[in-house]
Image: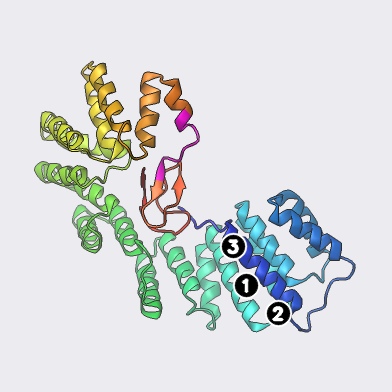
Amino acid sequence: MTYTEIASISTAIIIAVVFIFFLTRKNNIKRPKKTGLSVVNGLSAFFNGDDNTALDTLKDIAFKGNANPEIYLILGFLFRRRKDFTRASQIHEMMLGNQELDKDFRNALIGELAEDYMLAGQYAKAVSLLQKESQVMNNPDNIITMAKSALYSQSYDNALQYYTKYNKITGKEMPGFFEKCMVEKAVHAENAQSALKYIKSAIEKNKNCRPARIIKGLLYLNTDKVQKAVDEFQSVITDGLLRDMNDIKNVEKAYIAAGKEVELTNLLKQQVSGGASNPFIHIALAEKYEYNNEKEMAKTVLESYIEQPDTKIIGAKVYAEKFNNKLIAHVTKDSSSFKCRVCGFETNQYKDDCPKCSAYDSIYPK
């Protein structure tokens, strides 16, 4: 499972604002003595990206006791950035033990701790914490945490209830959450009939939900409805929903089972000649030419694709690997291959959810 990364510049700025706010407000929390320079050094290291120095300095201050609560907040952030969610939760638990925290700070802290639990895979603990705190249960961010925790622990009906609650309170939807629940329910369904029902619900919500479309085709194939599988995968190709080589292999399974490999090749040719933007259509056709020992044709297909005006990173990388083109390999070495269709986040790795905006199945090839 994936999680939302929080180590961004905007988050760092928010923490800085919170820190300054709490330093300047009047309250009854005792201030640490003779640690001013250490705090400055720790914060300086933090904002300069020197996490090791920041952690060492701020841990020393915090564990001596009587530190500002903001120090613990930043420590929790640093542990999260290291993906050490267990340590982050320990820091936030320690903060909650401070009886002098004001209500708003404490409520925010509870949400942070619940997210720590979720990211650490302690889903039941995350939900339980928030359910015990009635004053924070209706916070939209906390509802998202409960919804994700329920989903990850395969409590799909509970996840959908939280999804509905979030929609009712905010008037917004969690991008792709319903579809993801339906896909997961289909994957864990007791029989193909139930699985197909869930998949159809996902597609009704979003006809371009790639995982649902691929699973639908495979369900048809596995229940000997071969022509329906071919029809579904033909739509997957024409709608540009191929995302990786596994998708191509699943498509090929259906066409081979139907004895229609020539039709698949012709469909790919038609898509390529029509200027299809999806790189895996071009890669699939190139591989068919390679399989038939027509390497020059394979080379031509990929060359014509990467010569198009828009960025064609994946096609260029495949071309470089297949034909040992060192120039292209150098150009594409540090280029991101995938981009989120919702927020524009770029990455070189496949992700089920976008690490930045959490949108489901939004990472597609550039």
Quarter that holds the C terminus? top left
Q: What type is the residue that disc 2 sits on?
A: Leu
Identify the residue at image location x=60%, y=78%. 107
**In front: label 3 or label 2:** 3
Q: Position of residue 174 (x, y in %)?
A: 38, 66
> Dot 2, how many residues are within 10 Å of its Cα: few (below 14), some (14-19), or many (20+)?
some
Above or below residue 318? Residue 156 is below
Residue 170 appears in the figure: yes
Task: Give the quadrant of residue 63.
Answer: bottom right
The span shown in magenta is: 331-338
Q: What type is the residue that disc 3 sits on?
A: Thr
Above or below residue 285? Residue 167 is below
Q: Earlier in the sequence, mark 1 or mark 2?
A: 2
The Cα–Cα distance between marks 3 and 2, rounded to whole angstroms, is 22 Å
Q: Position of residue 45 (x, y in %)?
A: 74, 54
Identify the residue at image location x=83%, y=75%. 31
Q: Is residue 333 left or right of residue 110?
A: left
> Dot 1, how many residues are within 10 Å of its Cα: few (below 14), some (14-19), or many (20+)?
some
Q: Which residue is mark 3?
A: 11
* Helix, strand or loop under label 2: loop
| Residue sitting at the far right | 34
Q: Which mark is residue 101?
A: 2
CB atoms of marks 1 and 2 within 8 Å: yes
Q: Which residue is mark 1?
A: 109
* Helix, strand or loop under label 3: helix
Q: Nearer the viewer, residue 308 or 121?
A: 308
